[in-house]
Amino acid sequence: MKTLVIIPSRMSATRLPGKPLLKINGLSIISHVTKRAEEANIGDVIVATEDQEIVDDVKRNGFNAILTSNQHKTGTDRIHEALKKTNIRDVDFIMNLQGDEPAIDIDDIKSLNKKMAKNYSNLGTLAATIKENKNLKNKNIVKVVTEKKLEDHQFPRAISFSRISNYMDNIYHHIGIYCYSKECLEKFVHLHQSKNEIENRLEQLRALDNNIDINVSLAKSSPIGVDTEEDFLALKKIMEYKN
């Protein structure tokens, strides 16, 4: 089974514009993510972006990048265009890795890929244990409810995704990585955005609303995503300390 990792990235994030090129230990956030993906060693890695300065940065650091349209509504549309533009053929799975999680665990990437191949799943993602109940009300932490308890060797289906939840059973912190079979990605990008998806600003709800199963793999921990200036400074401190 062959996997291609595509990392969508753009400069115009609403809460922290220009974040892909912010530097930690002398390396941009987007290049840190790309380096992690390369180290997972599950297949070729490409950054898909509408910004030439991201292409230049990624290539300067020895990685691969493709310039895409600036008209895409979602990251999945962007990775689909990148897939069509690349010369890489015979791909079974496309992994959509978020460009703002430079601390993503390499073993979690490998684990998701392995489970996708073993189960011939259409669509898979990651989730971690929620450590504090207050996070159930935190809109910035997306929650997923699974049909049964998440364990290392299980790959259960997601029942629902939300930003605020009152659930207590089988609820986890969703981590925004998606691994699509090639057929599923083709189908997904041709579906209209669902009402649920638009209202909740959660792209994965389009899959559930169209009866596409999403399987969930247990992640070791929730990586700190960079959404705000505070996130960036906190993560910079941790990564520079480790270094």
Image (cartoon, rainbow, N blue to C red):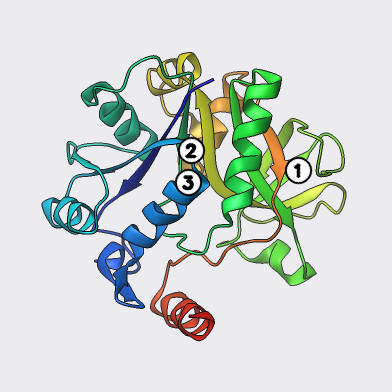
Q: For the point 31% across and 62% down, which residue is it?
A: 14
- Does residue 8 lie above or below 139 as drawn? above
Residue picked out by circle 3: 201
Q: Estimate the x, y position of residue 230 in percent, counting from the top left.
A: 45, 81
Is 13 in front, or is 224?
224
Residue picked out by circle 1: 145
Q: Residues within 10 Å of mark 1 (few under 14, many from 20)?
A: many
Q: Is residue 127 left or right of residue 182?
A: right
Residue 214 in view (yes/no):
no
SS at badge 3: loop
Q: Is residue 128 left or right of residue 108?
A: right
Identify the mark nearer the N-term, 3 or 1: 1
Q: Nearer the viewer, mark 3 or mark 1?
A: 1
Q: Nearer the viewer, mark 3 or mark 2?
A: 2
Identify the mark nearer the N-term, 1 or 2: 1
Q: Which mark is residue 42?
A: none
Quarter of the figure that contains the N terminus: top right
Residue picked out by circle 2: 203
- Does residue 190 lie above or below 114 as drawn? above
Q: Residues within 10 Å of mark 3 (few under 14, many from 20)?
A: few
